Each structure stands twice: as structure tokens, then as C-alpha cells.
Image: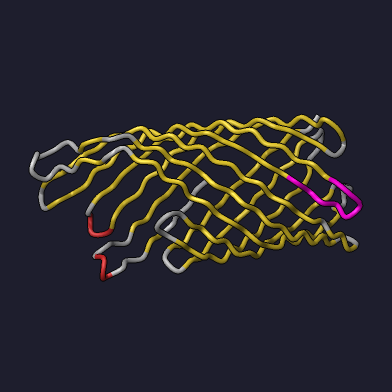
Amino acid sequence: MPTAPTTRPTIALQTSDTQARAYGVITGVDKWLSPETSIGLSLGLGRMSWNVEDGNGTGEGRVFQLGAYGHHRSGPLYLYLSAGVAGAYQDLSTDRTYSTASLKGHLNGYNVGARIEADLLLPADRTIFMPYGAVQTQWLHTPAYTEGGPALLAMSFDEGDTIASRTELGLWVNQIFTLDSGKPFALFGRVGWAHNFNDSLNIDAAMISAGTAFELNDGWSVAGKLEGELGGSSQTYQASGRIAYRW
């Protein structure tokens, strides 16, 4: 699942543009406990890389993630409630350049996150409107480590914990069609707003998404989605695909 966030420079702080990319594969299984309630487990593997402009540094990481989630539909107004929790292990390497010296670092990070979301489904013939709100938070722990390289230039970093939270408000719109084969085919999109915050940083961003989903034979279905998130100091673009089998 590729992303490409870019952070713009702040001259007063003498910072630089940073671009990051991430790719991953996620698999999971759902169990329906009733027509209204389902639970699931997921496993994810990913790889990421980042670089600072003008050759000032690069980094890469590998991620292993486990997650659990649930979904419940309630009431005559089709209120959908969902929640998920996940934990991840991250193996990270950095390579910082100072003058002609290369300073390398390595650390292992641990991440735990949770999300709660409420959706209200409003059908209108073959068009479905779904306003939603969500809250999520995640905790990242990084150990103390020291860069390798010339002793006068190498930096040491203390053990640290970071908590980052996020709220979302948005609207999904689904348009459903029927193919000649009788199978449903859907186009969907989203517009929304996100507020990201932690102890020292607050970022508001506009969200936009577009995608398609359709059913195949014998319980198989496929879907694809493009997403963008535009903030004052960062931009993120993401593409994802899904293959599912239901029995």
C-alpha cells in the first residue's frame, strides 16, 4: 500500500523537505457471529523508506503487524459501529550525512494503535450516503540508540514514547450498478476532514477518496481505492487493492 507524504520546510527552524514511501500486504479473516455482528483478525507485513532533500539522510524500515477488529449494525437507521486494535514491531535503520561523513543508526520500535468509528447509512435508491466520525490513537516506543560513525559527529538518542491521536469527520457516497451478469458493481468516494495532534504538533488535513468494487463468481470480490490527504505541512497519497473470498 504505497504512500508518499511530503513535509515542507520551515525556514526559521532550518528544516528540510522529507519524502517517505511505504508498501505493505495485509491478509485477514472475518467471522460473522450474527447477521449484525462480525469480528476479525489480520496480519500485515510492510516496508518503508524515507529521504531528506539535498542528500542529508535516508532511512528504511520493515514492519510486522497483528490486528483485531469488530463491526456491529444497530437500529432502524442502520447505525454501524466498528472498532479495531493493532500492534506492530518495526525494524528501522537510518543513514545521516554530515559533510563527508556517513552516520548510521539502527533501532527497533513498537507501536500499538486503536480506532473507533461510527457510520450512519442513508440509502436512497441505488445511492448510499454514509456520514461518519472516527477517533484513533497510537503509541510508539523507541529505545535509546547511538549512531555509528565518527565519535565527534555521532548523535545519541534517549529512549522515548510518542502518543499521536486523530479525529475524522467525513461522508462516503456509494453508487451501485448491476452488470449484465447480474453482479453488483459499485463506485464510491469520500470527502472529509482530519485533525492530527500530539504534545507538540497539530495538523488539519482535507481527505478525498475514490474507488470501485465488484463481485466475481463463487464468492470472490475485488476492490481498489485511491486516497489523498492534504494538510498545511504534509501531503499523503495512497493506493490500495483488496481481494476477498466469502463462504
Reply above or below: 122 against 2. Answer: below
Residue 80 drawn at (x, y percent): 78, 48
Using the image as rendered, state which of residue 65 and residue 226 is in the foreground: 65
Residue 158: quadrant of the picture: top left
Horizontal side, residue 221 vs residue 163: left or right: right
Horizontal side, residue 175 vs residue 138: left or right: right
Q: At x 16% / y 44%, what residue is drawn?
A: 102
Using the image as rendered, state which of residue 245 and residue 120 is in the foreground: 120
Residue 221 drawn at (x, y percent): 74, 41
The boundaries of the magenta stretch are 74-81
Whether the magenta-drawn stretch holds residue 103 is answered as: no
Q: At x 18% / y 49%, what residue is drawn?
A: 97
Q: At x 74% / y 58%, what residue is drawn?
A: 187
Reply above or below: 137 against 129. Answer: above
Coloured how? Answer: secondary structure
Horizontal side, residue 246 vs residue 150: left or right: right
Residue 231 drawn at (x, y percent): 48, 66
Reply above or below: 175 against 33. Answer: below
Residue 88 drawn at (x, y percent): 49, 34
